[in-house]
Protein backbone atom coordinates (compact mmCIF):
# COMPACT_ATOMS: atom_id res chain seq x y z
CA UNK A 1 0.00 0.00 0.00
CA UNK A 2 1.52 3.32 -1.07
CA UNK A 3 1.88 6.20 1.33
CA UNK A 4 -0.38 9.23 1.13
CA UNK A 5 1.58 12.47 0.97
CA UNK A 6 0.99 16.19 0.55
CA UNK A 7 2.92 17.88 -2.26
CA UNK A 8 3.25 21.65 -2.48
CA UNK A 9 3.57 23.87 -5.52
CA UNK A 10 3.82 27.67 -5.60
CA UNK A 11 2.40 29.42 -8.65
CA UNK A 12 2.39 33.12 -9.50
CA UNK A 13 -0.13 35.37 -11.20
CA UNK A 14 -2.64 38.08 -10.36
CA UNK A 15 -5.71 38.55 -8.20
CA UNK A 16 -8.38 40.96 -9.47
CA UNK A 17 -11.54 42.16 -7.72
CA UNK A 18 -13.41 45.43 -7.27
CA UNK A 19 -11.41 47.12 -10.04
CA UNK A 20 -7.96 46.40 -8.61
CA UNK A 21 -5.30 43.90 -9.62
CA UNK A 22 -2.44 42.60 -7.46
CA UNK A 23 0.51 40.28 -8.07
CA UNK A 24 0.21 37.16 -5.91
CA UNK A 25 1.94 33.86 -5.18
CA UNK A 26 -0.45 31.00 -4.45
CA UNK A 27 -0.03 27.66 -2.72
CA UNK A 28 -1.30 24.67 -4.66
CA UNK A 29 -1.66 21.50 -2.58
CA UNK A 30 -1.69 17.99 -4.04
CA UNK A 31 -2.90 15.17 -1.78
CA UNK A 32 -2.49 11.56 -2.84
CA UNK A 33 -0.29 8.53 -3.31
CA UNK A 34 1.63 7.12 -6.27
CA UNK A 35 -1.55 6.33 -8.20
CA UNK A 36 -4.11 9.08 -7.62
CA UNK A 37 -4.30 12.59 -6.26
CA UNK A 38 -6.57 15.52 -5.48
CA UNK A 39 -5.66 19.16 -6.10
CA UNK A 40 -6.60 21.93 -3.69
CA UNK A 41 -6.84 25.24 -5.59
CA UNK A 42 -5.72 25.15 -9.24
CA UNK A 43 -3.98 28.52 -9.28
CA UNK A 44 -2.47 30.25 -12.31
CA UNK A 45 -0.60 27.44 -14.11
CA UNK A 46 -2.43 24.30 -15.22
CA UNK A 47 0.66 22.93 -16.99
CA UNK A 48 2.83 23.20 -13.88
CA UNK A 49 0.18 21.49 -11.77
CA UNK A 50 -0.22 18.72 -14.34
CA UNK A 51 3.55 18.17 -14.33
CA UNK A 52 3.54 17.94 -10.54
CA UNK A 53 0.93 15.19 -10.76
CA UNK A 54 3.59 13.14 -12.56
CA UNK A 55 1.15 10.85 -14.33
CA UNK A 56 -1.13 10.22 -11.37
CA UNK A 57 -4.88 10.09 -11.92
CA UNK A 58 -6.49 13.33 -10.73
CA UNK A 59 -9.74 12.58 -8.89
CA UNK A 60 -10.90 16.15 -8.18
CA UNK A 61 -9.97 19.83 -8.35
CA UNK A 62 -11.24 21.34 -5.12
CA UNK A 63 -11.71 25.12 -4.90
CA UNK A 64 -11.44 26.53 -1.38
CA UNK A 65 -13.21 29.62 -2.76
CA UNK A 66 -13.74 31.33 -6.09
CA UNK A 67 -11.42 34.33 -6.08
CA UNK A 68 -9.83 34.33 -9.52
CA UNK A 69 -6.30 33.59 -8.30
CA UNK A 70 -7.50 30.29 -6.84
CA UNK A 71 -9.58 29.10 -9.80
CA UNK A 72 -8.06 30.66 -12.93
CA UNK A 73 -6.35 27.39 -14.00
CA UNK A 74 -9.15 25.05 -12.91
CA UNK A 75 -10.98 24.63 -16.24
CA UNK A 76 -7.74 24.02 -18.17
CA UNK A 77 -6.57 21.46 -15.61
CA UNK A 78 -9.97 19.76 -15.73
CA UNK A 79 -9.81 19.60 -19.51
CA UNK A 80 -6.31 18.14 -19.42
CA UNK A 81 -7.07 15.50 -16.79
CA UNK A 82 -10.80 14.80 -16.91
CA UNK A 83 -11.11 15.62 -13.21
CA UNK A 84 -14.20 17.44 -11.94
CA UNK A 85 -14.01 20.97 -10.53
CA UNK A 86 -15.78 21.19 -7.15
CA UNK A 87 -16.99 24.45 -5.59
CA UNK A 88 -19.36 25.46 -2.80
CA UNK A 89 -22.49 26.88 -4.49
CA UNK A 90 -22.43 30.06 -2.39
CA UNK A 91 -19.33 31.11 -4.34
CA UNK A 92 -20.92 30.69 -7.76
CA UNK A 93 -21.32 34.49 -8.25
CA UNK A 94 -17.56 34.93 -7.76
CA UNK A 95 -16.81 31.97 -10.04
CA UNK A 96 -18.96 33.47 -12.79
CA UNK A 97 -16.88 36.66 -12.75
CA UNK A 98 -13.89 34.59 -13.97
CA UNK A 99 -15.48 31.72 -15.89
CA UNK A 100 -18.94 32.92 -17.02
CA UNK A 101 -19.25 30.28 -19.72
CA UNK A 102 -18.07 27.28 -17.74
CA UNK A 103 -19.87 26.00 -14.64
CA UNK A 104 -18.15 23.94 -11.95
CA UNK A 105 -18.73 20.19 -12.27
CA UNK A 106 -19.94 19.54 -8.75
CA UNK A 107 -20.86 21.15 -5.46
CA UNK A 108 -19.09 21.06 -2.13
CA UNK A 109 -21.28 20.86 0.97
CA UNK A 110 -20.45 21.20 4.64
CA UNK A 111 -19.70 17.80 6.12
CA UNK A 112 -19.08 16.07 2.81
CA UNK A 113 -16.02 13.81 2.83
CA UNK A 114 -13.84 13.56 -0.25
CA UNK A 115 -11.66 10.46 -0.42
CA UNK A 116 -8.35 10.14 -2.23
CA UNK A 117 -5.97 7.20 -1.88
CA UNK A 118 -8.08 5.93 1.02
CA UNK A 119 -7.76 9.18 2.96
CA UNK A 120 -10.76 11.32 3.86
CA UNK A 121 -10.88 15.10 3.62
CA UNK A 122 -13.94 16.62 5.30
CA UNK A 123 -15.41 19.81 3.87
CA UNK A 124 -15.85 22.58 6.46
CA UNK A 125 -17.92 25.52 5.20
CA UNK A 126 -16.06 28.57 6.55
CA UNK A 127 -17.61 31.72 5.03
CA UNK A 128 -16.24 35.19 5.62
CA UNK A 129 -13.40 35.70 3.16
CA UNK A 130 -15.93 34.58 0.56
CA UNK A 131 -19.50 33.28 0.99
CA UNK A 132 -18.66 29.78 -0.19
CA UNK A 133 -15.19 29.48 1.34
CA UNK A 134 -14.37 26.00 2.60
CA UNK A 135 -11.54 24.30 4.42
CA UNK A 136 -10.60 20.64 4.01
CA UNK A 137 -9.75 18.72 7.18
CA UNK A 138 -7.74 15.51 6.83
CA UNK A 139 -7.49 14.03 10.35
CA UNK A 140 -5.39 11.06 9.20
CA UNK A 141 -2.80 13.51 7.88
CA UNK A 142 -3.08 15.88 10.85
CA UNK A 143 -3.69 18.81 8.54
CA UNK A 144 -6.32 21.28 7.38
CA UNK A 145 -6.23 23.13 4.08
CA UNK A 146 -7.63 26.57 4.84
CA UNK A 147 -7.43 28.48 1.57
CA UNK A 148 -7.67 32.16 2.50
CA UNK A 149 -9.73 31.66 5.68
CA UNK A 150 -6.81 31.33 8.12
CA UNK A 151 -3.15 32.25 7.64
CA UNK A 152 -0.05 32.25 9.77
CA UNK A 153 -0.80 35.42 11.71
CA UNK A 154 -4.53 35.75 11.34
CA UNK A 155 -7.71 35.63 9.27
CA UNK A 156 -7.99 36.19 5.56
CA UNK A 157 -8.85 39.64 4.22
CA UNK A 158 -12.43 40.86 4.45
CA UNK A 159 -12.16 44.32 2.93
CA UNK A 160 -13.55 43.52 -0.52
CA UNK A 161 -16.85 42.48 -2.06
CA UNK A 162 -18.50 39.26 -0.89
CA UNK A 163 -16.53 39.25 2.39
CA UNK A 164 -17.49 39.92 6.02
CA UNK A 165 -15.20 40.18 9.06
CA UNK A 166 -17.55 38.96 11.85
CA UNK A 167 -18.43 35.94 9.70
CA UNK A 168 -14.82 34.89 9.16
CA UNK A 169 -14.14 35.21 12.89
CA UNK A 170 -17.13 32.97 13.63
CA UNK A 171 -15.91 30.44 11.06
CA UNK A 172 -12.40 30.33 12.50
CA UNK A 173 -13.57 30.12 16.10
CA UNK A 174 -16.30 27.53 15.54
CA UNK A 175 -14.88 25.36 12.76
CA UNK A 176 -11.07 25.64 12.91
CA UNK A 177 -9.96 26.44 16.45
CA UNK A 178 -11.93 23.41 17.63
CA UNK A 179 -9.51 21.13 15.74
CA UNK A 180 -6.58 19.51 17.60
CA UNK A 181 -3.92 22.15 18.36
CA UNK A 182 -1.20 20.17 16.59
CA UNK A 183 -3.16 20.26 13.31
CA UNK A 184 -0.99 21.74 10.55
CA UNK A 185 -2.67 24.65 8.74
CA UNK A 186 -1.78 24.65 5.04
CA UNK A 187 -2.80 28.01 3.66
CA UNK A 188 -3.64 29.55 0.31
CA UNK A 189 -0.68 31.94 0.46
CA UNK A 190 2.49 32.05 2.53
CA UNK A 191 3.80 29.78 5.24
CA UNK A 192 2.02 26.98 7.06
CA UNK A 193 1.18 27.22 10.76
CA UNK A 194 -0.73 25.18 13.35
CA UNK A 195 -4.10 25.57 15.02
CA UNK A 196 -2.33 25.80 18.38
CA UNK A 197 -0.13 28.66 17.20
CA UNK A 198 -3.08 30.72 15.94
CA UNK A 199 -5.70 30.03 18.61
CA UNK A 200 -4.30 32.36 21.31
CA UNK A 201 -4.65 35.36 18.99
CA UNK A 202 -8.41 35.15 18.42
CA UNK A 203 -9.27 38.07 20.71
CA UNK A 204 -6.50 40.18 19.15
CA UNK A 205 -8.01 39.61 15.70
CA UNK A 206 -11.45 40.56 16.97
CA UNK A 207 -10.14 43.75 18.58
CA UNK A 208 -8.16 44.66 15.46
CA UNK A 209 -11.11 44.08 13.18
CA UNK A 210 -13.41 46.57 14.90
Image (cartoon, rainbow, N blue to C red):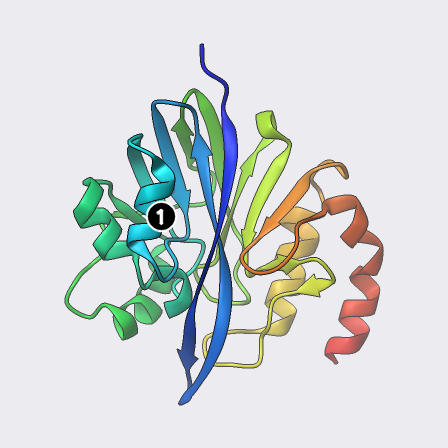
Q: Nearer the viewer, residue 153 or 96?
A: 153
Q: Quadrant of the N terminus?
A: top left
For disc 1, the neighbor class at 10 Å (few under 14, some 14 to 19, many from 20) is many
Q: Nearer the viewer, residue 89 or 40?
A: 40
Query: Residue drawn 40% across and 28% down?
Result: 115
* Quadrant position of residue 202: bottom right
Residue wearing tag 1: 49
Determine the secondary structure under disc 1: helix
* Vertical side of 187 occupied by 168: above or below: below
Q: Residue furthest left?
A: 101
Measuring from the top left, give residue 113's x and y in whole percent.
43, 33
* Quadrant position of residue 190: bottom right
Query: Residue drawn 31% across and 30% down?
Result: 56
Q: Residue furthest top?
A: 1
**Left or right of 158, for residue 106:** left
* Vertical side of 172 occupied by 183: above or below: above
Residue 67, can we see it?
A: no
* Quadrant position of residue 116: top left
Measuring from the top left, give residue 61's x and y in whole percent.
33, 45
Query: Residue drawn 48% across and 34% down?
Result: 121
Residue 131, can we see it?
A: yes
Q: Nearer the viewer, residue 192 or 46?
A: 46
Q: How many marks?
A: 1
Measuring from the top left, give residue 69's x and y in whole percent.
41, 67
Q: Quadrant of the C terminus?
A: bottom right
Measuring from the top left, give residue 45's x and y in whole percent.
34, 58
Query: Residue drawn 77% across and 39% down?
Result: 181
Amino acid sequence: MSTVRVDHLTTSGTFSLDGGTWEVDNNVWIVGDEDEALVVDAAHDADAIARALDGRRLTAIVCTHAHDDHIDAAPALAEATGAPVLLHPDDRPLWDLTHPGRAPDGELADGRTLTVAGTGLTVLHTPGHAPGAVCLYAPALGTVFTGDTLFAGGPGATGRSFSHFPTIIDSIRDRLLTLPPETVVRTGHGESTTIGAEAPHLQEWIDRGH
